[in-house]
Image: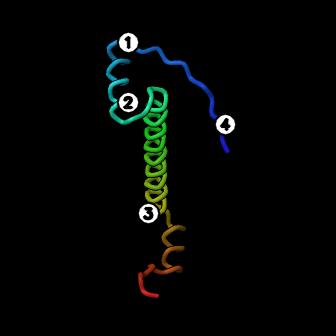
Amino acid sequence: MATAQPVSVRLDDDVRSTLERDAAQHGVGLATYLRELATDRAKAVRKAEIRTQSRLVGERARSSREAHEFYQSVGTPSAEV
């Protein structure tokens, strides 16, 4: 399990008050709210990175003779069991 590390962030007064209001509307404190925002964003970034890597693998496979031969030998998957 990863260890949580504290982060210090400076916010302008109006930005902080806006985020505090939104946090209160969600029933959490500012620190929890910011942690949830950061966690959600990190998940989105990781998903985007995985999609990019998958696309690159697909492009490589599409342009590779070896990959084409491999997929020809394996066949096309189907939903039938």
Q: Are marks 3 and 4 in contact (CB under 8 Å)?
A: no
The answer for how far apart the CA atoms under marks 1 and 2 are is: 16 Å
Left/right placement of residue 12 relative to residue 31 reads: left
Amino acid of disc 1: Asp
Q: Would you say the residues marked 3 and 1 are in contact, meaning their CB atoms lie under 8 Å apart?
A: no
Q: CA distance from mark 3 to mark 1?
A: 50 Å
Q: Name the mark nearer the viewer: 1 or 2.
A: 2
Q: Earlier in the sequence, mark 1 or mark 2?
A: 1
Q: Position of residue 70 (x, y in %)?
A: 54, 73
The numbered disc on residue 23 is 2
Question: Considering the numbered disc 2 on the image, is that residue within a helix, a strand or a loop?
Answer: helix
> Is mark 2 in CB contact (under 8 Å) with mark 4?
no
Residue 8 at x, y percent in the picture? 54, 18
Q: Give whichever of discs 2 and 4 has the lower sequence position.
A: 4
Q: Name the kind of residue labelled 2 in the image.
A: Ala
* Crowd tier of the residue under label 3, counting other residues whose Cα lies within 10 Å: few below 14, some 14–19, many 20 or above: few
Q: Pick whichever of labels 3 and 4 is earlier in the sequence.
A: 4
In whole angstroms, how far apart are the C-alphas of marks 2 and 3? 47 Å
Identity of the amino acid at label 4? Thr
Residue hosting label 4:
3
The residue under label 1 is 12
C-alpha distance separating marks 3 and 4: 40 Å
- Marks 4 and 1 close (CB-CB < 8 Å): no
Q: Secondary structure at mark 3?
A: helix
Looking at the image, is mark 2 or mark 3 earlier in the sequence? 2
How crowded pointer 4 is (Cα within 10 Å; few <14, some 14-19, many 20+) is rated as few
Instruction: Tell me if 23 is positioned left or right of 32 in this view.
Output: left
